[in-house]
Image (cartoon, rainbow, N blue to C red):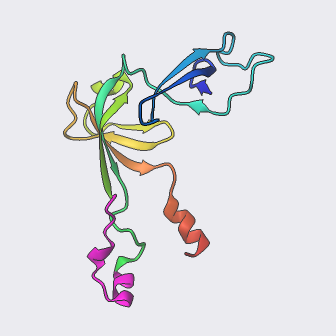
Amino acid sequence: MRLRNAYIIQCDEVVRDEHGQVIELHCSYVPGSLGQTPEGAPKPRGVIHWVSARHGVQAVVRLYDRLFAHPSPDAAAGKEGKAFTDYLNPDSLRTLTQCVLEPALAAAGPGEVFQFERQGYFCADADHVRGKPVFNRTVTLRDTWAKIEQKGT
């Protein structure tokens, strides 16, 4: 794998707990791979976007999604004899409390907008204060509803 804006890394050892869950990866970097793949080195399978846990800032991130799990809850409710509230999306809000963000985001003012790479667009919440950042996702980068509607399902 390549670390975004850094080197290709290779996994040298996987450490597992007593239940077989991965708890650590011991890795090394491939010398000469900063911004390029040296001759003879394997091509990286992907890029890991990362933030330094040591230098990053802890934040709360709220992931908002569609309020309803059906594109037309009123119509579906009428056809199926249910209430439109039966189609509420239980995952319409997920709150992540252990996020690590770039340090500069701690100084953002409420309402400032940012793109979190490969995640979507976020704005600093009114609850956002220096040292305790809170961000809300306003737009995702992938729209699964558009794919569903294209397939006609």
Residue stretch in magenta: 74-91
Identify the residue at image location x=58%, y=18%.
6
Which quadrant does the N terminus fall into?
A: top right
- Image-based side of 128 in relation to 37, left or right: left
Give 67 or 90, whichever is nearer the viewer.
90
* Residue at 61 percent of width and 17 percent of height: 7
Relative to 29, is 24 on the left or the right?
Answer: left
How far across and down, in percent of the image, does residue 133 sit? 26, 32
Quadrant where the C terminus is found in the figure: bottom right
Along the line of sight, which residue is nearer the eye, 7 or 105?
7
Looking at the image, residue 121 lies above or below residue 30? below
> Residue 48: image x %, image y %?
55, 30
Residue 105 found in image quarter: top left
* Residue for point 54% across, 68% down: 148
Q: Is residue 148 above or below residue 33?
A: below
User: Outermost residue toward the front?
Assistant: 18
Give whichever of 46, 108 is nearer the camera: 46
**Residue 19, percent across and down?**
42, 36
